[in-house]
Image: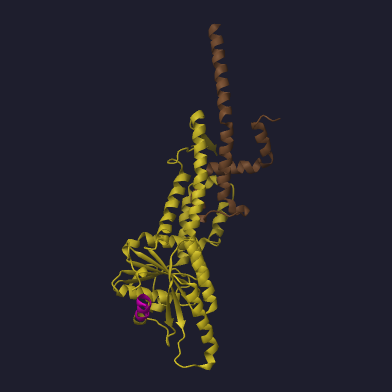
Chain colours: A brown, B yellow
Amino acid sequence: MVRKILEDIRAFLKGFGGSFKEQSTEYIEFEERELENVFALILMGSFVGIPSPPTTLVVRLMPHMVKEMHVMQQRAINLDDIFGEIAGMFDID
Amino acid sequence: MREFLLPTEGFRAVFVIGKGGVGKTTTSAALATAIARKGYRTLIVSLDPAHNLGDVFMVKLSDKPKELRENLYASELDMEKLIKGYLKHLEDNLKHMYRYLTVINLEKYFEVLSFSPGIEEYATLEAIRNILLEGEKWDVIVFDTPPTGLTLRVLALPRISLIWADKLIEIRKKILERRRMIAKVHGDRKFQLEGKEFTLPKEEEEDPVMKELLEYRKEVEFVEKVITDPNKTSVVAVMNPEMLPLYETERAYESLKKFRIPLNMIVINKVITVEREIPEIKVKLDAQKKVLEEIERKFKKVEIIKVPMFAEEPRGLEWLERLGGMVLEG
């Protein structure tokens, strides 16, 4: 019985800690995603008509940009709900 | 002798610039011949896609330096081949990660890249960089350049590229900093795409994007350092005593100043000198006089040399040596 209670408390604390951990980096993760998006957008800017860095640099960086391009793609898909994401982050319903 | 045309620290790069048809190739060939005659190991390279360096020397040239006489080597860069090679190199770089890049149709992008604006400038810059990297093989490298517009854009590229690289490095640093913060709480993060798992790099040394950025920055900085160093680079502008070349030289002078590239000398080519008055060409001579006065007034800190219009075109080594002597010695 005592053991069960202890296990429950441990699970609760773990969950509590986990959620606390999640929340603690939420803003930084959002910021990181935005920076990755901006980084990819700058490199791909010529496709939407904004000035681009030197072509050499763009083509040299592109093979290593898998994550950033994925983020950029996701951003393009979720673009109309970007305020929803920000509102969610600040617990605004 | 004009010191700014001779090597002081290691090698000297001399860029001969000017409007189309003013005699850049002849002047640069003459200069290279005269410098070689003084005992300096000299290479003259034509970057102009409309090659006529070989015509001036009256020999056939290729992209490998050819020895024309003791200490004098000449080559003509094949720009088309260069652009193809340059794109091939970039394409190979891309291929191994190609399948992940599904955001845009990259294959089509590559097909049109060889016609994209600016590609010629990048290829030219790459060619200049490769020659400068092997600069120690020579005492003086004379570049016979394409008409002013393209040359100025090429010479401006290193500075512009550095600004871009610095800005991207700054953003990348921020990204990596945030990744490190997150990793401290959650441990190393994985990223999954098409069933393949990647560990997100968080340190500058392990991030391929950062490595590529720093490598590129280093490469461009090398060219930038050489072309802005007055002990290593000189620019010679060639013009005719007419208004349009004067305006173009002025613009070039301002541009070069902005990018801190030293313009040391203006060669006024094909100056008409007559011993007695000829009424038929009086208008032409008056216009020429006016341009010459303007040049003296506008370029006070730049050395100016006048080369007369010769009865015959200066071609072949002997002619070039005489002409080069005039430019080199004054």
- The reply to whether the magenta stretch includes residue B321 is yes
Position of B162 compared to A19: left or right?
Answer: left
Q: Quadrant of the N terminus of chain B?
A: bottom left
Is residue B293 one of those drawn in magenta?
Answer: no
Q: Is residue B128 left or right of residue A7?
A: left
Residue B35 occupies quadrant: bottom left
Position of the C terminus of chain B by quadrant: bottom left
The prevailing secondary structure element of the residues shown in magenta is: helix
Q: Residue at x 53, y 85 (%)?
A: B286
State which region is magenta: B320-330
Q: Can you give x and y, in whole percent of width and height, for residue A62 in the image?
A: 51, 48
Residue furthest to the right in view is: A93
Q: Residue at x 50, y 83 (%)?
A: B289
Residue A7 as seen in the image, left or right of residue B141: right
The answer to which of B206 and B64 lies nearer the viewer is B206
Q: Position of residue B62 (x, y in %)?
A: 39, 70
Q: Is residue A6 visible?
A: yes
Q: Is residue B52 visible?
A: no
